[in-house]
């Protein structure tokens, strides 16, 4: 009965820790903005806003494709995030303005800090920390600088929040639990890992996979070398359980991950001054070292630097916690369930440093993370619960599943005092250190020393009070966390306000933005922001502000030639006023709009002249200044059972169908054709467009790289209905 009540209490405590964290964080950041800066306000927020609007107007799956950016941005398999991840709340379709979206992103931050705290509580419990200390650690973990350094990237924080859950569920499997607990742990691994992937399948997925792999390798090596038969049998059961969890996760998120892998195999990643990486090219050593730490940064574990609070890679945990975690490993090296997580964190710590880049570059999966300081986030997640266990071990050795001689306890006390004196002297010798760093170090190490030496009046309060003092002492950095008012927002800057006003004027003078596209001149310093804001106003552009991006699409459309621009329907060019000509529409003293009538609309019909080439992108780029429209298809994109020869005969002849309905999700049209041809939709096939021709389902064909064609096999009058998915059922 007691075990049953304990099992029921765990979900309740998890929920209460999450609620308490959310309330405390909301109070701490009351009146401040959590999400700010170019990445969030100029890229993420507009994209979330468009997703929310699409879902509100057209249905849940409508948010999976954005026609406003990069000639059609499909989110079915991009590595940015999955729009339908439940805790992004895109499915509500509730955003009336971009400011609503920014508020929602702040809520997403707070929610996932709460989820992270609850996960750290579970991780503490699986490591062996007592209930009260686990609760304290769960409440404190979300306040560590590593977690707060991600506030500007809500999608990354959302993914990161599930790492302690993934590791905790795995550690439960290593304990060889009963059948029903094993089933729950298997489902826990699969579901939490899938949520991590859908939130953002990038660096945090790599951290979780590599960290889990190190734990398994260490445990397997120890069991094979030193374990008895029952331990090896337990390892076999755990391995099978993890394999089952992996299979379930593959069912839940495998298709999305596969699409992401295919996308990245064709994508370009910008590396700043280090150049670019295209497709499966290996990351250059110089790029990996750009964000790596150096040996002098090792003190970041115990040395809080206020300047790094908003930088990913803030390793700070606090001297007491680091010391206690190290002591846990030293005293429990023969306990693989404690040693394995510590080893995984230690290896992740090494991955943060520049000197290990050549080794890291050779390790599959691990070498996919360019910014090596991300590994510090995994380090903090694992070391903090281990440090909590170490506190328990130091302060109450008789109840920590370990027997510690009194002589060793005294030596630990002496080491703490010596370490504290040495570090204080080192810090004081550097006059540039802020007083908060020295004060924090003195308080935390002093508290540890007092708690080890001072006999509390009653044994009942000794452990919780002492441990709370130590853990809270590691959280002194929150006193110096920056809190920004709305005045710090990009959206309140004068140049952003001006761009939004100009964008509204441009949208007002474009009557056919649903049929044609626009292009913002790169002569504008903020041309990417301009493009994104115009897409928020239901206009369709050929550029965007996303990375990574498909390489061929970037080559074709980021700086399109006149012929490619005509082919992709770029009718409106937003140009600086000084470059305008007679007939251009003047918006204000800085902006004009040039109109090109010789372009193809969103839907057109092509008879003959289609060429089969190895790479349509290369063929279009090789045309040069030729103004004639060209149509190319790659052999791999040809339908297997379609005789394509009628579509290649002679020269191309283009006809414009009669469009009766045109929305972002559906186009209805009719046409009287003189022969077989291709109905071409000027949208990316990755949007999963489908069509019926005279009521019969037509096979979509990729043409010109990023347009969608549907074959029409005979002459006569035809009715077309083209749509993309909008509802689950």
Image (cartoon, rainbow, N blue to C red):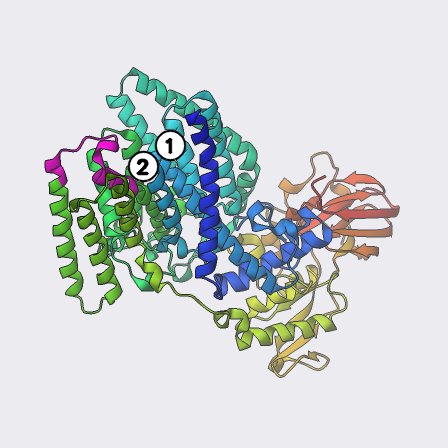
Quick check: 54 left or right of 398? right
- Residue 577 in view (yes/no): yes
- Residue 682 in view (yes/no): no
Quick check: 280 left or right of 444? right
Nearer-the-camera pick, 66 or 361: 66
Nearer-the-camera pick, 107 or 377: 107
Instruction: State the SS at label 1.
Output: helix
Q: Quadrant of residue 337?
A: top left
Q: Residue at x 39, y 45 (%)?
A: 138
Where is residue 618? Give x, y as percent: 58, 53
Dot 1 and dot 2 residues touching (CB under 8 Å): yes
Image quadrant where one finds the N terminus: top left
Report the Cα–Cα distance between label 1 and label 2: 9 Å
Q: Residue at x 56, y 69 (%)?
A: 527
Q: Residue at x 31, y 39 (%)?
A: 344
Instruction: State the SS at label 2.
Output: helix
Q: Residue furthest front?
A: 457
> Is residue 41 part of the magenta span, yes or no?
no
Mark closer to the chain start, 1 or 2: 1
Image quadrant where one finds the C terminus: top right
Q: Is residue 663 above or below residue 343?
A: below
Graded by Cα atoms within 10 Å as few (under 14), some (14 to 19) or many (20 or more), the crowding at tag 1 reads many
Q: Residue at x 59, y 74 (%)?
A: 499
Magenta segment, which residues?
388-409
Nearer-the-camera pick, 616 or 140: 140
Graded by Cα atoms within 10 Å as few (under 14), some (14 to 19) or many (20 or more), the crowding at tag 2 reads many
- According to the picture, the residue beneath numbered tag 2 turns out to be 341
Q: Which mark is residue 158?
A: none
- According to the picture, the residue beneath numbered tag 1 turns out to be 171
Q: Is residue 75 above or below residue 493?
A: above
């Amino acid at each position: 009965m007691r075990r049953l009540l304990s099992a029921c209490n765990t979900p309740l405590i998890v929920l209460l820790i999450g609620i308490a964290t959310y309330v405390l964080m909301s109070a701490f950041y009351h009146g401040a903005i959590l999400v700010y800066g170019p990445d969030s306000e100029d890229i993420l927020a507009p994209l979330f806003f468009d997703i929310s609007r699409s879902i509100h107007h057209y249905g849940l799956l409508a948010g999976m494709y954005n026609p406003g950016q990069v000639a059609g941005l499909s989110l079915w398999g991009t590595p940015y995030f999955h729009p339908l991840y439940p805790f992004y709340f895109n499915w509500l379709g509730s955003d009336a303005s971009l400011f609503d979206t920014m508020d929602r992103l702040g809520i997403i931050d707070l929610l996932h800090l709460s989820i992270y705290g609850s996960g750290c509580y579970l991780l503490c419990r699986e490591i062996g920390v007592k209930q009260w200390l686990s609760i304290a650690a769960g409440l404190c973990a979300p306040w560590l600088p590593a977690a707060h350094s991600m506030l500007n990237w809500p999608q990354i924080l959302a993914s990161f929040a599930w790492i302690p859950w993934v590791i905790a569920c795995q550690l439960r499997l290593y304990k060889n639990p009963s059948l029903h607990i094993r089933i729950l742990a298997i489902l826990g691994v699969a579901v939490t890992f899938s949520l991590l992937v859908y939130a953002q399948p990038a660096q945090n997925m790599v951290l979780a996979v590599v960290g889990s792999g190190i734990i398994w390798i260490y445990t397997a090596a120890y069991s094979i070398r030193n374990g008895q038969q029952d331990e090896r049998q337990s390892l076999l059961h755990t391995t099978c359980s993890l394999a089952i969890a992996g299979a379930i996760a593959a069912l839940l998120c495998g298709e999305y991950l596969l699409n992401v892998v295919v996308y990245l195999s064709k994508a370009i990643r910008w590396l700043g001054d280090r150049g670019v990486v295209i497709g499966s090219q290996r990351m250059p050593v110089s790029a990996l070292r750009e964000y790596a730490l150096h040996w002098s940064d090792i003190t970041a574990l115990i040395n809080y630097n206020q300047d790094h609070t908003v930088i990913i890679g803030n390793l700070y945990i606090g001297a007491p916690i680091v010391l206690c975690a190290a002591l846990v490993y030293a005293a429990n090296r023969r306990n693989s369930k404690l040693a394995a997580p510590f080893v995984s964190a230690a290896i992740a710590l090494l991955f943060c440093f520049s000197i290990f880049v050549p080794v890291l570059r050779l390790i599959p999966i691990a070498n996919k993370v360019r910014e090596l300081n991300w590994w510090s986030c995994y380090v903090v997640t694992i070391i903090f619960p281990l440090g909590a266990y170490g506190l328990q071990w130091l302060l109450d050795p008789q109840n920590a599943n370990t027997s510690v001689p009194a002589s060793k306890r005294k030596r630990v006390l002496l080491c703490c005092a010596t370490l504290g004196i040495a570090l204080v002297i080192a810090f004081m010798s550097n006059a540039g250190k802020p007083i908060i760093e020295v004060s924090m170090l003195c308080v935390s190490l002093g508290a540890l020393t007092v708690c080890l030496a001072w006999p509390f009046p009653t044994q009942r309060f000794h452990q919780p009070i002492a441990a709370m003092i130590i853990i809270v002492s590691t959280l002194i950095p929150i006193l110096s966390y920056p809190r920004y008012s709305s005045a710090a927002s990009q959206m309140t800057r004068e140049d952003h306000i001006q761009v939004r006003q100009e964008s509204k004027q441009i949208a007002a003078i474009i009557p056919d933005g649903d049929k044609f596209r626009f292009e913002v001149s790169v002569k504008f310093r903020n041309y990417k922001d301009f493009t994104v804001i115009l897409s928020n106003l239901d206009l369709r552009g050929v550029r965007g502000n996303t990375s990574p991006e498909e390489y061929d699409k970037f080559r074709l459309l980021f700086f399109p030639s006149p012929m490619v621009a005509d082919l992709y329907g770029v009718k409106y060019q937003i140009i600086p006023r000084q470059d305008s000509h007679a007939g251009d529409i003047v918006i204000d003293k800085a902006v004009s709009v040039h109109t090109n009538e010789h372009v193809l609309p969103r839907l057109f019909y092509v008879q003959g002249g289609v060429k089969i080439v190895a790479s349509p992108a290369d063929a279009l780029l090789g045309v040069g200044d030729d103004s004639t429209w060209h149509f190319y298809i790659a052999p791999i994109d040809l339908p297997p059972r379609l005789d394509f020869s009628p579509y290649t005969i002679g020269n191309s002849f283009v006809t414009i169908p009669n469009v009766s309905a045109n929305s972002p999700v559906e186009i209805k049209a009719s046409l009287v054709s003189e022969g077989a041809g291709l109905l071409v939709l000027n949208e990316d096939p990755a949007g999963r467009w489908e069509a019926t021709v005279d009521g019969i389902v037509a096979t979509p064909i990729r043409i010109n790289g990023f347009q969608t064609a549907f074959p029409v096999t005979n002459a006569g009058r035809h009715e077309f209905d083209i749509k993309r998915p909008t509802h689950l059922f």
